[in-house]
Image: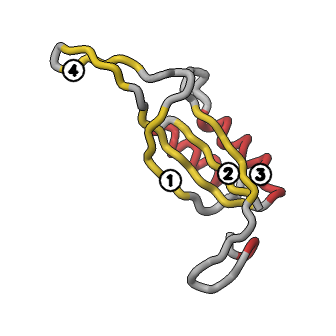
Amino acid sequence: MKLVCAIIKPFKLDDVREAIADIGVEGLTVTEVKGFGRQKGHTELYRGAEYQVDFLPKVKLEIATLDDQVDRLIEAIQKAAHTGRIGDGKIFVYDLEQAVRIRTGESDAEAI
């Protein structure tokens, strides 16, 4: 099992959700986060004053999946989140040792 973590632009969330549903992956956790990479933020104008915004709004997706679905999941996220502009995001894949569904006690693949 793997945990796929993707950091994407907020307006791409619906596109990514639809793309992963189309490949049969169910269940994800979404968190609103802030951060920066190579963008290093940007400047904005507010009431005539310019100020630096260091942390940009992003959305973090966490998806637990089976090993054989990881490549398709990554491809779906990458295609749906791509704009071709800086700040499109990143995808990280972690090993997932154990998963337990609290309601039923099912574990591992059955819990996903």
The CA distance from mark 4 to mark 1 is 29 Å
Judged from the image, the secondary structure of the residue bearing numbered disc 4 is: strand
The CA distance from mark 2 to mark 4 is 37 Å
Location of residue 60 in the rendering, given as x and y in whole percent from the top left corner: 53, 46
Circle nearer the N terminus (3, 1):
1
For the residues bearing labels 3 and 2, Cβ distance under 8 angstroms: yes
Quickly name the residue at label 3: 70
- In the figure, residue 57 lies in which quadrant? top left
Residue 46's disc is 4
Circle nearer the N terminus (4, 1):
1
Q: Which residue appears farthest toward the left when viewing the image?
A: 47
Circle nearer the N terminus (3, 2):
2
Q: Which residue appears farthest toward the right when viewing the image?
A: 68
Give the left or right position of residue 68, taking residue 57 as reference: right
Quickly name the residue at label 1: 30
The CA distance from mark 1 to mark 2 is 12 Å
Location of residue 30 in the rendering, given as x and y in whole percent from the top left corner: 50, 53
Relative to 50, residue 1 above or below: below
Give the left or right position of residue 45, taking residue 81 as reference: left
For the residues bearing labels 4 and 3, Cβ distance under 8 angstroms: no
Count the numbered circles shown. 4
Judged from the image, the secondary structure of the residue bearing numbered disc 3 is: helix
Residue drawn at x 62%, y 86% as measured from the top left = 104
Quickly name the residue at label 2: 4
Residue drawn at x 56%, y 22% as measured from the top left = 38
Q: What's under tag 2, amino acid-wise?
A: Val
Give the left or right position of residue 67, taking residue 104 as reference: right
- In the figure, residue 56 lies in which quadrant? top left
Q: How is the image coloured?
A: secondary structure
Position of the N terminus by quadrant = bottom right
